[in-house]
Image: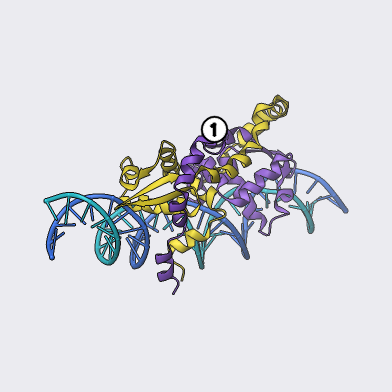
Chain colours: A purple, B yellow, C cyan, D blue
DNA sequence: TTGACACGTAAGCACTAGCTTACGTATTAT
DNA sequence: ATAATACGTAAGCTAGTGCTTACGTGTCAA
């Protein structure tokens, strides 16, 4: 019933985290961080069709991360970084974990036991290997 | 060919952004921010099966955001916030856009023209509505 | 006015995400 | 020993993602 685009738009709210989850969209934001750009400008560095970029831009718009202004037949996109603030605020409250040395000791203490379990489960990987 | 889990693991690298893209996983990290927890503890507040939580934890482990230590029949998860630093660094360099007032003026100047285009395209929505 | 340009959207595709249930394994309790 | 606990993984499902090509609309250029 709903189109793909509507469903994507419906994710707004959660939208910012979703939007920055994609590397292409992060690169778009980075590009816009250096000033407003129009679509062809934005699309040029990507090994991807222009419509694909349009779709990414749509998602960024829905997330409120960029705004668009029509200028003749071009559309100028501009960064709206304010929405990134919620992400900043969220990660910032973890900052203490890498700046404060307090925690670091505890971290170190079980690093040797925990080490082998960070992202590897040899038994399983072995079995899956074939 | 590859299992779902291997495919997920393969996203590592990109992994941190992907991992924090899911609200459940962010809540898990928030919970772990208040100290190590074992799985049932972590799963309790969620309206979701425990295996689902295990899968989320697996993704967090693959992203290097948490570590796990076996303690008898329980598994203790601990936050590894260091990996969040790359996210922090990325968003932090947008901080100037909402703290510096310089840009704010320019933003304001085309806010009235841009406003209508932030996340709504009435013409299209109209058409899709039926 | 006709054509080229700069887009955005639609449709359709292969793949991925996130969930569930079913099940297996290691550890503790009885 | 047997049963219960605390997990992790597998399989399978639905819905969402991200891409492509095809096409439509509005604007500028000749």
Q: How many marks?
A: 1
Picture quadrant where residue A58 is located: top right
Query: Foreground residue, D20 or A16?
Result: A16
**Residue D24, image x, y percentages:** 62, 53
Image-based side of D29 in relation to A36, left or right = right
Question: Label 1: few (<14), some or many (≥20) within 10 Å?
Answer: few
Is residue B50 placed above or below B88 in the rendered structure? below
Q: Chain of mark 1?
A: A
Q: Which residue is mark 1?
A: A89
**In this view of the protein, can residue B45 be seen by the observer?**
yes
Q: Is residue D1 above or below residue A81?
A: below
Residue at 65% x, 43% y is: A29
Percent across and percent down for residue A104 are 51, 40
Can the viewer see residue B130?
Answer: no
Q: Position of residue A20 (x, y in %)?
A: 57, 45
**Residue at (62% x, 55% y) in the render:** A52
Above or below, comparing residue A18 to residue A126 in the picture: above
| Quadrant in the picture for residue D2 | bottom left
């Amino acid at each position: 019933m709903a189109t793909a685009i509507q469903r994507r738009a419906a994710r707004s709210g959660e939208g910012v985290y979703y939007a920055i989850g994609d590397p292409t969209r992060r690169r778009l934001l980075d590009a816009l961080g250096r000033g407003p750009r129009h679509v062809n400008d934005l699309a040029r560095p990507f090994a991807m069709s222009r419509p694909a970029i349009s779709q990414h831009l749509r998602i960024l718009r829905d997330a409120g991360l960029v705004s668009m202004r029509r200028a003749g037949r071009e559309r100028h996109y501009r960064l709206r970084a304010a929405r990134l603030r919620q992400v900043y605020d969220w990660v910032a409250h973890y900052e203490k974990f890498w700046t404060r040395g307090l925690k670091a000791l505890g971290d170190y203490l079980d690093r040797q036991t925990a080490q082998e379990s960070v992202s590897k489960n040899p038994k399983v990987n072995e079995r899956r290997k074939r």
